[in-house]
């Protein structure tokens, strides 16, 4: 079983792309041999009222509940966010929430975020969506400082956080700073044998396989893991076990 | 045959891990340059001569794997011309690598390109359009297009499809003597397909940018692209092989 910890559906805001539907996500997952995926709405980063983005994709997601788990976009600076969270959790069956702090214009060291963190749901934090060098002039969004995720995690040791789209150096630094941070590998493209080296540095217990479909190709993530110098136990944890543990509590 | 047209040494050498991965992934040739043991934006002749000597050592160590590209600094035009002669005629290198010491259309580049035309070897020119700002003298794809229009008989490789690949493709599509390489950490969905659609598969080359980028990631990006298998074969090796054979013909 291969679980993808970071996928998106929805139209690319700045580029023509036909890969935006749930159907296409499933097709691309099949092509890359991915069984299940945690999925969030890409529009969740761009709508200030992120809940609207969840509502948009939910009807299609729920038809494939055997393969897709909603990680609800959430903007804790938006009025009514607690109601949104309750609805996402209880009605939309969200298995966690995804924050886009720099797209929604806040830092993590705020009472609203502390309150959210105290609720105990897994919190996925997209520290970037794509390489900052590629941003269009209308939407230059710096990455969220990874250290701020570690600070938040250390304040809430009973909540589990996922550093999403971190680079190699960000992941190794932050996972050493807080034991309740996981990291997806969607943003790790190097160096040679990058996943083997990551595991040697921080262990495999908190690394999550992720592609960032449909913004990125899926197969590079598979190859990163398949061709890394890893034990089968490490590979299994990264592919499946860690995410299963994280979102099934 | 798979040929990686864009590899750099790490320090003074090549990591055994990269050799191992190349073998496992079926990458039979690595086109290798060195940007210096410590990367230098403005290498002195001493630095680029040492870098090229390091490449020559690797070529000797791995004669069936390593093909050398000589690193030059156009600011030192005379020394670079002498070094190109040494690298091509004495050390058997098969291409030129230019990085960020001068814009691609700087007149100091012209004598080097004229010499490369004489040798019938390709010039691999780094380029990127960075939303976050380029380095001083770092070429964007328009600089490379200017150079290519001035020397239509030169074979010029636009590295990384200029990072911002949509822009890079548009900038060079009317320059038939520019090929683009797919190297680098950007694995955004659609980049290979768009290059094939706009430029034709014969103008697209597989590259990794190892050691910085995991070779498996770079290979998978090409394998995952939704293109014809015949086009994939051209990209993975046949195009580069044809380019290298021009020197011998």
Image (spheres, coloured by chain):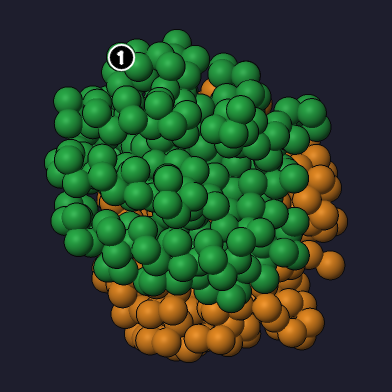
Chain colours: A orange, B green
Left or right of B212? Residue A35 is right
Residue at image position (27%, 57%) is: B48
The location of residue A33, given as percent across then percent down, is 82, 54
**Residue closer to the observer: B41 or A109:** B41
Residue at image position (31%, 68%) is: B37
Q: Residues within 10 Å of mark 1 (few under 14, many from 20)?
A: few
Residue at image position (41%, 35%) is: B123
Left or right of A243? Residue A203 is left
**Residue closer to the observer: A110 or B195:** B195
Q: Quadrant of residue A28?
A: top right
Residue at image position (33%, 62%) is: B51
Which quadrant would the N terminus of chain A be assigned to in this image?
A: bottom right
The location of residue A224, given as percent across then percent down, is 65, 64
What chain letter is assigned to the residue under label 1? B
Name above or below for residue A232 compared with residue B176: below
The location of residue B150, given as percent across then percent down, is 30, 14
Q: Quadrant of residue B113?
A: top left
**Residue closer to the observer: B5 or A180:** B5
Left or right of A180? Residue A35 is right
**Residue closer to the observer: A158 or A178:** A178
Q: Secondary structure at mark 1?
A: helix
Which quadrant would the C terminus of chain A be assigned to in this image?
A: bottom right
Left or right of B210? Residue B144 is left
Q: Is residue B55 visible?
A: yes
The location of residue B224, given as percent across then percent down, is 71, 43
Where is mark 1, residue-wise? Answer: B150
Name above or below for residue B89 compared with residue B249: below
């Amino acid at each position: 079983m291969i679980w993808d910890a970071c996928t998106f559906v929805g139209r690319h805001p700045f580029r023509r792309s036909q890969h935006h539907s749930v159907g296409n996500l499933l097709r691309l997952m099949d092509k890359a041999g991915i069984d299940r995926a945690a999925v969030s709405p890409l529009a969740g980063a761009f709508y200030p009222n992120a809940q609207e983005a969840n509502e948009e994709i939910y009807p299609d997601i729920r038809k494939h509940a055997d393969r897709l788990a909603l990680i609800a976009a959430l903007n804790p600076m938006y009025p009514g966010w607690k109601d949104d969270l309750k609805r996402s959790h209880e009605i939309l069956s969200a298995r966690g929430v995804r924050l886009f702090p720099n797209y929604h214009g806040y830092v993590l060291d705020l009472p609203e975020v502390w309150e959210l963190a105290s609720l105990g749901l897994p919190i996925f934090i997209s520290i970037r969506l794509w390489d900052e060098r590629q941003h269009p002039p209308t939407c230059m969004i710096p990455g969220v400082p990874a250290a701020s995720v570690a600070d938040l995690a250390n304040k809430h040791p009973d909540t589990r956080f996922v550093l999403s789209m971190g680079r190699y150096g960000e992941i190794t630094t932050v996972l050493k700073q807080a034991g309740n941070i996981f990291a997806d590998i969607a943003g790790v493209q190097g160096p040679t044998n990058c996943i083997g080296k990551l595991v040697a540095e921080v262990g495999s217990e908190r690394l999550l396989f992720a592609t960032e479909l449909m913004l990125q190709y899926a197969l590079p993530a598979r190859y990163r893991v398949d061709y890394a110098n890893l034990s089968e136990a490490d590979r299994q944890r990264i592919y499946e076990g860690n995410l299963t543990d994280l979102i099934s509590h | 045959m798979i040929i990686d047209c864009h590899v750099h040494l790490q320090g003074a050498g090549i990591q055994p891990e990269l050799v191992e991965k190349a073998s496992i992934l079926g990458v039979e040739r690595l086109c290798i340059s060195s940007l210096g043991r410590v990367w230098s934006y403005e290498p002195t002749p001493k630095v680029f001569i040492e870098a090229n000597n390091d490449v020559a050592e690797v070529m000797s160590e791995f004669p069936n794997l390593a093909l050398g590209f000589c690193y030059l600094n156009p600011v030192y035009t005379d020394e670079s011309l002498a070094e190109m002669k040494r690298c091509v005629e004495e050390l058997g290198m098969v291409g030129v690598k230019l990085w960020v010491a001068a814009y691609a259309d700087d007149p100091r580049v012209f004598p080097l390109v004229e010499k490369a035309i004489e040798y019938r070897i390709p010039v691999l020119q780094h380029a990127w359009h960075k939303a976050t700002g380029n380095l001083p003298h770092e070429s964007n794809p328009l600089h490379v297009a200017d150079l290519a229009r001035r020397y239509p008989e030169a074979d010029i490789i636009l590295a990384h499809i200029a990072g911002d690949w949509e822009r890079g493709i548009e900038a060079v599509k009317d320059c038939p003597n520019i090929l683009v390489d797919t190297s680098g950490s950007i694995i955004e969905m659609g980049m290979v397909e768009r290059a094939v659609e706009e430029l034709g598969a014969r103008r697209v080359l597989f590259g990794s940018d190892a050691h910085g980028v995991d070779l498996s990631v770079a290979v998978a990006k090409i394998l995952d692209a939704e293109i014809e298998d015949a086009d994939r074969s051209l990209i993975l090796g046949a195009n580069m092989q044809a380019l290298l054979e021009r020197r011998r013909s």
